[in-house]
Image: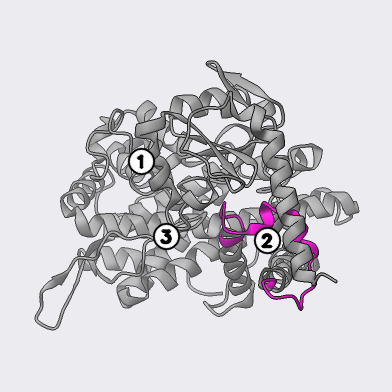
Amino acid sequence: MLRPLAVAAIACGTYVLAKHLLCSRERLRMAPGPTRWPLVGNALQIPQLNPWLTYSKWADTYGDIIHLDVLGQPVIIINSAEVARDLLDKRSSIYSDRPHLVMAGDLVGYSEGFALKPYGESFRRQRKLIKQDFAQGTVPRYFHLQETDARKLVQALLDDPSSLARQLKMSIAAIIMEANYGYTVKSEDDPYITIPFSNADNFSKACAVGTWLVDFIPQLQHLPLWMPGTGFLRTARDWREIRINASWIPYRWCKENLSAGIAHTPSLCATSLLQADGELSKEDEHALVWAAGSVLGGGLETNVSTILTFCLAMLHYPEVQAKAQAEIDAVVGTDRLPSITDRTSLPYVRSLVTEVFRWNPPAPLCIPHALSEADVYHGVHLPKGSVVVPNIWHMLHDPMTYADPMDFKPERYGNADAEMQKVTDLAFGFGRRACPGFYFAQGTIFAVIATVLATCDVVPAVDERGEPIVPEIAYTSGTIVCPEPFRCNIKSRTERARALLIQSIPSPE
């Protein structure tokens, strides 16, 4: 009698072979791509680390659209901004679905939230909730919150610059928690933010394309936990509990404390609860919980990554920092701190922020799309069910568009908003899957960067001999990437600047 592991191996092999044979005819009409191996296709050619760099190299050989076969699953890599806009924006009706990620969606349950939700009515309901609260016209009500927390962050960094990453995480979490739930974060150990940070990290790992074999051989999810090689099932079980707690615990706090006046308003959840007199239907409540959870999970790591990238860039390009500081001094003056409403008067600072998004985008491949119907683009057949991966990193480092793409050059935009928008349109996603919290995120990032520039110098840390330590430009790998830990010093530009910070921060109630 065959052992269970042997049975599983035979079943998996049969499944992959069947998919391989079914796709063989379609493969004749696909876009070009690297040579496929029998059965596994290109699965072994996709690196676990920084796959966008490999896709970028392949673009030189295969062009703007690359077809891969991963264990029978067609994967389309898009390396061109023009192609991405043509397909993901202009044909969004058939490019707005998500791939069926067994690990992230079925086992951990992230498909309940906006980011991985299949395209349909439930997805639209969640997106509407987010967009109506964080739309361009409504997001100014959060400016004071964003500016105040940015100033608290900078004050904390002046006191202890070695805590950059830790303090930044707490600050971003505090902004999102108050805007989402009306909750004021107490400390960096507050469980209301430690659980969401664990969840955000798990999400990035769970969604990484090509990481989990079960995404390509779904039958593996039914294996018993005692069988060797099923550690992913235990991981999914643990991550599922964290995911549920990250969304439901702060929502329940908001609901319970709203009537007592403890939950601050406005906030995403408080506004919806007040409009419904606290009596949401089960369906609407679930939509609100997972919409707010998606904002929290999606905003934490991306905002932290972006601001750490800014700090890293200032260490390598001090002349850019000096030029931005000079613009703030000339336009805003030294008698007050910059506000988000100053953006329109600070074109170089806007260019700097845009260059941060371009230089090292926090989501180099974003979350893949899925093609719900077969399509043809310039004679290239794109099969139904394809996983569609926009290589944002390559689009933002294309030397034909951005000269010297590895250099940090805010001047490349000529202070033209139209050129800056081309970058942010790519960095924040495409079509109906574009980030609905775009305006809120832009406000948070500008508030932090402008406050740092107005009041501080970001300079290298020094070694025991007093020599500057300029960190390497190195990043983690995943759905969301972040600079590897680095040291720096953050020094007050003037005593006047430090005094302005202290005066601008409200006293604790």
State how far apart marks 1 and 3 are (Cα).
22 Å
Q: Is disc 3 placed on a helix, strand or loop?
A: loop
Q: Quadrant of the N terminus?
A: bottom right
Residue 236 position by quadrant: bottom right
In the shown orientation, is residue 149 left or right of residue 194? left
Residue 376 position by quadrant: top right
* Residue that appears at 57% across and 47% down: 141
Q: Position of residue 456 (x, y in %)?
A: 26, 62
Q: Residues within 10 Å of mark 1 (few under 14, many from 20)?
A: few
In the shown orientation, is residue 69 left or right of residue 342? right
Q: Position of residue 450 (x, y in %)?
A: 34, 52
Q: Position of residue 239 (x, y in %)?
A: 68, 69
The residue wearing badge 3 is: 482
For badge 3, the amino acid type reads Cys
The residue wearing badge 2 is: 181
Residue 503 position by quadrant: bottom left
For badge 1, the amino acid type reads Lys
Find out whether residue 198 is within the magenta segment: no
Give the number of the mark in front: 1 or 3: 1
User: Which label's residue is closer to the chain start, 1 or 3?
Assistant: 1
Residue stretch in magenta: 205-230
* Residue that appears at 72% across and 69% down: 233
Give the number of the mark in front: 3 or 2: 3
* Residue that appears at 38% across and 73% down: 156
Q: How many marks?
A: 3
The residue wearing badge 1 is: 57
User: Which label's residue is closer to the chain start, 1 or 2?
Assistant: 1
Q: Residues within 10 Å of mark 2 (few under 14, many from 20)?
A: many
For badge 2, the amino acid type reads Tyr
User: Which label's residue is closer to the chain start, 3 or 2?
Assistant: 2
